[in-house]
Amino acid sequence: MPAALTHRPLSLAQETCCDGRIRVAGDAAHGRVHCGIQGFPSVVQTNSLSMEQPPRRRRIFTLKPVDVAHDDGRATNISILSLRAPHMRQFHLAWLGFFAAFTSWFAIPPLIKSIKKDLGIRDSDAESSNFAAVVSAIGFRLAVGPLIDRYGPQRAMAVILVLGSLPVAFTGLVSSGSGLIALRFFVGLLGASFVPCQAWATSLFSKDVAGSANAIVAGWGNMGGGFTYLVLPQIVALFTLMGLTPTLAWKVTLVLPFVVCVVVAVLILVYGVDSLPVGPREQLPAGLAGPSMAAVSQETIASDELEQRRHPPKAATARLTRTLGLFGRMLLNPAVLILMLHYALTFGVELAIDNIIGTYFLEHFKRSSCNPQTDPDKCSLLTVQTAGLLGSLFGLTNIFSRASGGILSDWLAYAMPVHGMPLRLLLQTALLVITGISVVVFSSLSQLASAVPVMVIFSLSCQMGCGTTFALVPRVHPEHNGVVSGLVGAGGSIGAAVFASVFKSVAPNYADGFDILGKVVLVAGIGSGVLLSIEGQSLWRSALAMLRRLRPASATQP
């Protein structure tokens, strides 16, 4: 009997076959290796057409230089510790740009108590400025999308950093509440940096690792919100010790985020690129030098402009109709709507809390023997610096939390191919439940020793939920992933605006706002999590299938 065909690809350079038999002949021209055992020869085809096997999953992370796909030049794994061009250098520039944007976007909240006191701004105006900073980001995100298509994420990110951080540097010139509201409205442009950040990371990595790359750059960028609470109050204290007045100290401090954004923007313009070649394009094999996003878009734009010159009204109307129709179809997809809600319950919650967490620690935790009416400044258990330090914990957990959510969700799909999607949906719902419960508990605590650990719990679950949400996005409508991603991202900004309005309505009693927020996340998370259906799988379908399997077994019991 001839030996069975092997299922492992063979190299013609090998001297033995994969099952240990001695290679006795080779035919490189026809891709055959002749192997024999005890005098019985057999022919093993080595070409890929005759020896199909499931593709071997690559490791997502590596300490070596990244592997590059030869069809589009994208990296197939992530080398976190590398700064090698182009993939990892652009990867680090993407999260660094988003980090700098967050640093300026949330530079004012850690210092808002001093700003209100020195400028005579009312609490209601301060809350309105928080609201303006997150609401304006919705419109700016929509406007930035076409700019990225035309000019690429590199230049879009650099422009956003400079223009968005410039108003922060001018905060010291504000003299009224309305001026602060208007200033922070334009600072909301920095919230649009999320769009080039994600577009950049997506263009660098293959679809197998793009989700993990997106989660990492977004999570590390979100750390900027915690970094401001950690660093800026300390810088104000340092300037005060150096002899500046408290008022001048915070005004000078708010110039620093602008300087950081300008420096990062210069780095992005000098070292960043939109294209994917690993060397001079003319020296690369065909297909290895991936075209830049801007170049591809320019071809599309040129085609559109040619059509528009031929039929001006018709072309413009048709393009608008196609765009609106696509957005309309996606909005009619229940999975898209539910993921928008989930991102509102995770990223929206994170943004709303970023605006008030330092103030909450400063004003909620009081000395029991003190009368806030007579001496409010001395009743707080914390100083501005220590309140900022505790508030920074909420944002700094992003160093691993958001990425871990996306990676865990992808791992469930890989480790359990049959039940992977239901388990991913269960993970998504569980994180929302944990977030809701822990936020409600946090709202009722009056002791720092118990409040801080609970805050860390809901910061971890909330940020992991951001990662699991975007890990599911590519599964909803792969051919229109960009539109779905944009809509889900907009859901986060809408959620931030809604929850910011909740905190505004209950200010200065933020504990009630946390209570409302937690209950909304809990109820909406459970209801929508059970109904969410992706790739024909959902939690309720899985539960029904489990009941059907258990029913015959229970019926046979005596």
Image: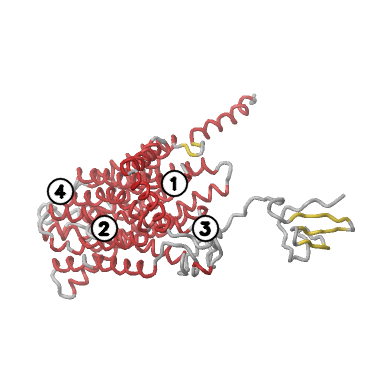
> Which of the two labelled residues, at mark 4 and mark 1, occupies the earlier sequence position?
4
What whole-number distance in Å separates the C-alpha atoms at marks 2 and 1?
Answer: 29 Å
Q: Earlier in the sequence, mark 2 or mark 1?
A: 2
Cα–Cα span, label 4 and label 3: 52 Å
Spatial separation of the CA atoms under disc 3 and disc 1: 18 Å
Check disc 4 and give the amino acid type. Answer: Ser
Q: In this view, does 148 lie to the left or right of 113?
A: right
Q: Regarding mark 3 in the picture, which secondary structure is present there?
A: loop
Instruction: Name the residue that disc number 4 marks.
Output: 124
Look at discs 4 and 3 and give the one toward the viewer.
3
| Amino acid found under the numbered disc labelled 1 | Asn
- In the displayed structure, 237 sits above or below 121; it is below
Q: Nearer the viewer, mark 2 or mark 3?
A: 3
Q: Say which residue appears at 25% left-offset and 59% top-offset.
A: 164
Secondary structure of the residue carrying tag 4 is: helix
Q: Please name which of the two marks, 3 or 1, marks the residue nearer to the observer.
A: 3
Q: Which of marks 2 and 1 is in front?
A: 1
Where residue 31 sits: x, y (%)? 74, 58
Disc number placed over residue 72 in the picture, else none: 3
- CB under 8 Å between discs 4 and 2: no
State the SS at label 2: loop
Question: Which mark is first along the chain, 1 or 3?
Answer: 3
How would you rate the neighbour count of disc 4 (Cα within 10 Å): few for under 14, some for 14-19, many for 20 or more?
some
C-alpha separation, residue under disc 4 versus residue under disc 1: 40 Å
Query: Which element is circle 1 on?
Result: helix
Give the residue number, with chain letter if any, for mark 1. 481
Q: Mark 2 points at which residue?
A: 106
Q: Horizontal and vertical percent for residue 274?
A: 41, 62
Q: How crowded is mark 3: few (under 14 residues within 10 Å), some or many (20 or more)?
A: some
